[in-house]
Image: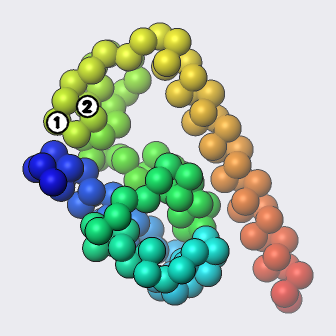
Amino acid sequence: MTKKNIKKETVIQEKIRQAMKEAGLTQTKLANKLNVKHPLINAWLSGRRNPTVTSLKKIAAATGKPLQYFFENSGNVGSIGDGNKIGEQNFTSNPSDIELLRKDIELLKKEIEILKLKNELKDKKKK
């Protein structure tokens, strides 16, 4: 594992921990919400494994955070277009890639809103 990867993983681990704390979720509760086994959550938090984007989307929905939250202030996501940072490497985005990313972000935002509404309905039915 290089220093670049350690920095990136550490930021995501910290973000997951913080999101869990703010949402009042234990590892077990998060595992139940994501329909995964507890050891997987532990592996993400310890750095033994990295969550996939799909897993991060689910974590975001479960904790009420936008997907971007897990990458903010990490040096992993910059403003789209000019010269972004991924880890320690600069790159310039292709305009068609930027448009696809924007569309993906909008779809993710909609998915998160749908999941929030579903959770609210579940909570209302329980009452």
Q: Secondary structure at mark 1?
A: loop
Q: Is residue 99 above or below residue 10?
A: above
Image coordinates for residue 126, horizontal then vertical, percent: 84, 87
Q: Quadrant of residue 6?
A: bottom left
Pointer 2 residue? 85
Q: Is residue 38 visible?
A: yes
Q: Which residue is more in the foreground, 53 or 79?
A: 53
Q: Secondary structure at mark 2?
A: strand
Q: Is residue 116 above or below residue 30?
A: above
Pointer 1 residue? 88
Q: Is residue 81 left or right of residue 67?
A: left
* Quadrant occupied by the N terminus: bottom left
Q: Are marks 1 and 2 in contact (CB under 8 Å)?
A: yes
* Quadrant occupied by the C terminus: bottom right
Circle 1 residues within 10 Å: few <14, some 14–19, many ≥20: some
Q: How many marks?
A: 2
Q: Given the current orientation, which residue lies at the most extreme top position? A: 95
Circle 2 residues within 10 Å: few <14, some 14–19, many ≥20: some
Query: Label 1, label 2: how many angstroms apart (C-alpha)?
Result: 6 Å
